[in-house]
Image (cartoon, rainbow, N blue to C red):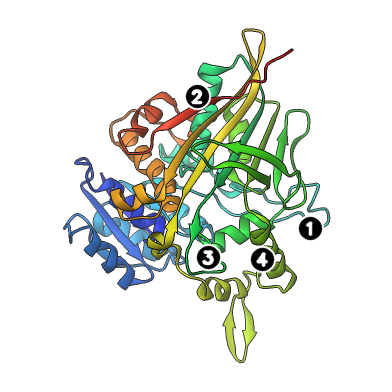
């Protein structure tokens, strides 16, 4: 397989590192706006000739197409902030390559009632193009990171093996990660974090469809495994809620994230000051987006691994019935930062995000996953994916949470 990797930040580096030992990887082109970053990652990979470096402007669809054709790639892997998704997605279609991303095209809140009604939903642009991809015999897999991605595979597995009827699919994400030396240092792209945390969260219900609520709503305490413990989680906009109901039968779908009071406070302050704005403004004759300034002021998550400690847990909580009895389970994956740094040289959050994309490429390369159109992870058989997780260094767990009935 020959891959054009668009974006060589933390997740892009982790994709390359996890893929490197796999013999079926013929070539991964490391392409980024920051050519020095590409060279840094190339060097960490041992200057392997399978990882050439290229400058790319992800906003320039023509440049993406030129690089894809230059290297005759089979697959374009989108590992940049989702603001560039449309151009990369369309470029893959034009050159006839398989497309894979870990976050779908962006949403736009409802103009007059954002906390009740959906405007443009995550992935709407991509799903509107699904018929075109089918007619051309091409495949786009959207949302195949960890969340979305692995968590969606878990939802399909729960439907296929663990439940007769599902009442709710709830993605629950929490961690006990600490970063030394910083008062505030996100462990993932702050650009993406602002987008998903400050937009109205989406909920899906069978009798109502997709609707929105206020950011950070419906707090609940969820107990995470592996010593992470009880954490308060809140509603956040995320792709799983837009993906799971398309292929998995459920009465309700939610996504809740353990952000913490400090993190929520910072996000609210950024919003109050307008620093979450992604549209450019004039600052002393220079056009600049406030959100880009915020990102530039914070440490790069790709270089925080040595200052991080702790674990992060991603998973899918499922409530329903099996054999006429109520059942609750949590399917999850825990990534330990020390182990990820030792094994891949990448911090836990980006490594955990990246491995699913590499497994997806593996399954595509060997004809285990196949199809045409625009498909989420739930559209494919889950067992082959989950069987590979331990081999890739990210074993899953299943925690029975069924409450005893007196």
Tag on residue 111? 1
- 63 or 174: which is nearer to us? 174
- Sequence-first disc among 1 and 2: 1
**The residue tagged with tag 4: helix, strand or loop?**
helix
In the displayed orientation, state which residue is furthest to the top.
323
Judging by the rendered image, the residue that carries numbered circle 4 is 266
Question: In the rendered view, would you say 115 is above or below 189?
Answer: above
* Disc 1 from disc 4: Cα separation: 25 Å
Mark closer to the observer (1, 2): 2
Rendered image quadrant of residue 171? top right
* Disc 3 from disc 1: Cα separation: 32 Å
Asked whether residue 51 appears in the rendered view, the answer is yes
* Disc 4 from disc 2: Cα separation: 37 Å
Q: Position of residue 184 (x, y in %)?
A: 56, 67
Rendered image quadrant of residue 80? bottom left
Judging by the rendered image, the residue that carries numbered circle 3 is 185
Judging by the rendered image, the residue that carries numbered circle 2 is 157
Mark closer to the observer (3, 1): 3
**The residue tagged with tag 2: helix, strand or loop?**
helix
- 84 or 354: which is nearer to us? 354
In the displayed orientation, state which residue is furthest to the right.
112
* Disc 4 from disc 3: Cα separation: 11 Å
């Amino acid at each position: 397989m020959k891959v054009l990797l668009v974006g060589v930040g933390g997740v892009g580096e982790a994709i390359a590192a996890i893929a490197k030992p796999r013999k079926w990887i013929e070539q991964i082109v490391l392409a980024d706006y920051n050519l020095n970053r590409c060279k840094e990652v190339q060097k960490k990979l041992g200057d392997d000739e399978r990882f050439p470096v290229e400058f790319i402007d992800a906003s320039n669809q023509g440049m993406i197409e030129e690089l894809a054709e230059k290297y005759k790639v089979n697959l374009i892997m989108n590992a940049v902030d989702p603001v560039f998704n449309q151009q990369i997605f369309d470029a893959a279609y034009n050159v006839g390559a398989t497309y894979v991303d870990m976050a779908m095209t962006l949403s736009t809140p409802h103009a007059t009632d954002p906390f009740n009604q959906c405007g443009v939903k995550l992935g709407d642009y991509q799903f509107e193009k699904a018929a075109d991809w089918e007619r051309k015999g091409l495949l786009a897999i959207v949302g195949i990171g960890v969340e979305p991605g692995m968590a969606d595979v878990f939802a399909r597995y729960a439907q296929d093996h663990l439940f007769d009827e599902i009442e709710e699919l709830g993605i629950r994400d929490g961690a006990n990660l600490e970063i030394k030396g910083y008062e505030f240092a996100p462990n993932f792209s702050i650009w993406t974090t602002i987008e998903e945390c400050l937009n109205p969260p989406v909920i899906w219900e069978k009798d109502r469809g997709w609707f929105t609520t206020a950011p950070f709503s419906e707090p609940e305490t969820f107990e995470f495994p592996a010593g992470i413990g009880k954490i308060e989680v809140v509603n956040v906009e995320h792709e799983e809620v837009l993906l799971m109901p398309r292929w998995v039968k459920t009465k309700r779908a939610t996504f809740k994230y353990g952000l913490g009071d400090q993190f929520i406070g910072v996000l609210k302050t950024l919003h109050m000051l307008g620093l979450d704005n992604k549209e450019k403004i004039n600052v002393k004759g220079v056009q600049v987006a406030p959100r880009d300034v915020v990102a530039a002021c914070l440490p790069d998550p790709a270089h925080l691994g040595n200052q991080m400690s702790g674990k992060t847990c991603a998973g899918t909580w499922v409530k329903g019935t099996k054999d006429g009895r109520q059942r609750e389970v949590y399917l999850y994956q825990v990534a330990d930062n020390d182990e990820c740094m030792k094994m891949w040289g990448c911090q836990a959050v980006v490594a955990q995000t990246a491995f699913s994309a590499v497994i997806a490429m593996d399954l595509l390369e060997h004809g285990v996953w196949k199809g045409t159109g625009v498909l989420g992870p739930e559209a494919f058989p889950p067992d082959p994916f989950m069987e590979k997780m331990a081999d890739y260094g990210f074993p899953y767990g299943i925690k029975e949470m069924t409450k005893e009935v007196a």
